[in-house]
Image (spheres, grey):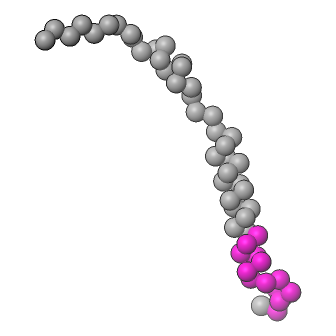
Amino acid sequence: MPQMAPISWLTLFLLFHQSFLIFNTINYFSFLPPSPLSQKKSINQTPLNWKW
């Protein structure tokens, strides 16, 4: 393609690859999972008496 002759295909690949990685890391670190402390409160904590 003569329209894209000034831009190297390797440069384009690196640009898109870097933007893809940045986009994925931003999405990964912006997700906040529910904290385990809120899950512990919902569990009934009755003592288990084992009779062996």
Q: Position of residue 42 (x, y in %)?
A: 46, 14
Question: Which stretch appears magenta?
Answer: 2-15
For the stretch drawn in magenta, what is the main secondary structure?
helix
Q: Quadrant of the N terminus?
A: bottom right
Query: As drawn, is 33 to the left or to the right of 10?
Result: left
Residue sitting farthest toward the front: 52
Q: Is residue 4 part of the magenta span, yes or no? A: yes
Decide if residue 44 is on the left or right side of residue 51.
Answer: right
Among all residues in the image, which is located at the extreme left?
A: 52
Q: Closer to the camera, 49 or 21?
A: 49
State which quarter of the image contains the C terminus. Answer: top left
Q: Tell me residue 29's x, y (percent).
A: 67, 43
**x 73%, y 80%: residue:** 10
Q: Is residue 32 above or below residue 44?
A: below
Q: Position of residue 32 (x, y in %)?
A: 63, 34
**How many discs appear?**
0
Q: With respect to residue 2, does 27 lie above or below?
A: above
Residue 8 placement, left or right of 24: right
Residue sticking out furthest to the right:
6
Q: Is residue 3 above or below residue 38?
A: below
Residue depicted at x 73% and y 68%: 16
Name the quadrant containing residue 51.
Answer: top left
- At 73% from the left and 72% from the top, the residue drawn is 14
